[in-house]
Image (cartoon, rainbow, N blue to C red):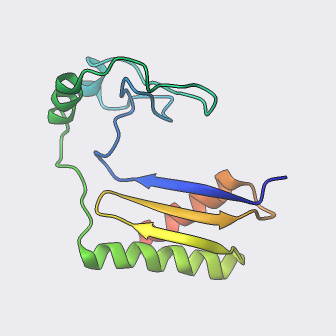
């Protein structure tokens, strides 16, 4: 029985879709990133820590971004947290823990009647609107 979920939301520039350590991405949309390889969709059952990692290549790929990575200011982080709270109240979702950092956010939520993918989209959408 699933009691809850840990959701992690990255900002633009946090984790590349083709990171050699794996990512949750099916597609690398930025053409400039494609030269660094295809998306690296990794399932939860796969272990990536032993895979070799080329830090210089990852940093070079980040230099290919068209815009600078997103870093939340304190005001923006508070807005993201308020977006999460608003969605939780409207959907009757219990949030057990929340952390909004400069380049990503975490939520730990209780299991709900909606599937976690739908909830994640709702939380992301409401935080983006804020």
Q: Position of residue 39 (x, y in %)?
A: 43, 24
Q: Is residue 3 left or right of residue 44?
A: right
At horizontal 58% and vertical 25% (from top left) the residue drawn is 46
Q: Is residue 99 left or right of residue 115?
A: left
**x, y percent for residue 63:** 14, 34
Residue 51, quarter of picture: top left
Q: Is residue 119 depicted above or below 66 in this figure?
A: below
Left or right of residue 77, residue 128 in this image? right
Pick whichever, 60 or 51, lies toward us. Answer: 51
Q: Please tell me which residue is depicted at 24% across the width and 60% down the height of the picture.
A: 71
Residue 20's spot in the image, x, y percent?
Answer: 37, 23
- The x and y percentages for residue 69 are 22, 50
Q: Quadrant of residue 35?
A: top left
Tally the numbered discs.
0
Q: Residue furthest right?
A: 1
For the point 35% across and 40% down, the residue is 15
The quarter of the picture where the C terminus appears is bottom left
User: Residue at the location (16% across, 25% down)?
Assistant: 56
Residue toward you, 44 or 82? 44
Give the quarter of the image for residue 128.
bottom left
């Amino acid at each position: 029985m699933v009691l809850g979920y840990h959701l992690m939301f990255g900002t633009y520039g946090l984790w590349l879709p083709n990171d050699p350590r794996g990512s949750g991405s099916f597609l690398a949309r930025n053409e400039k990133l494609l030269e660094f390889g295809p998306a690296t969709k990794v399932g939860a059952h796969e272990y990536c820590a032993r895979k070799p990692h080329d830090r210089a290549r990852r940093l070079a790929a980040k230099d290919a971004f068209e815009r600078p990575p997103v870093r939340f200011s304190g005001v923006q982080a508070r807005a993201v947290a308020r977006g999460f709270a608003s969605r939780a109240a409207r959907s009757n979702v219990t949030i057990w823990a929340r952390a909004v950092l400069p380049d990503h956010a975490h939520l730990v939520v209780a299991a709900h009647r909606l599937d976690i993918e739908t909830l994640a989209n709702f939380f992301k959408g409401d935080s983006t609107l804020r």
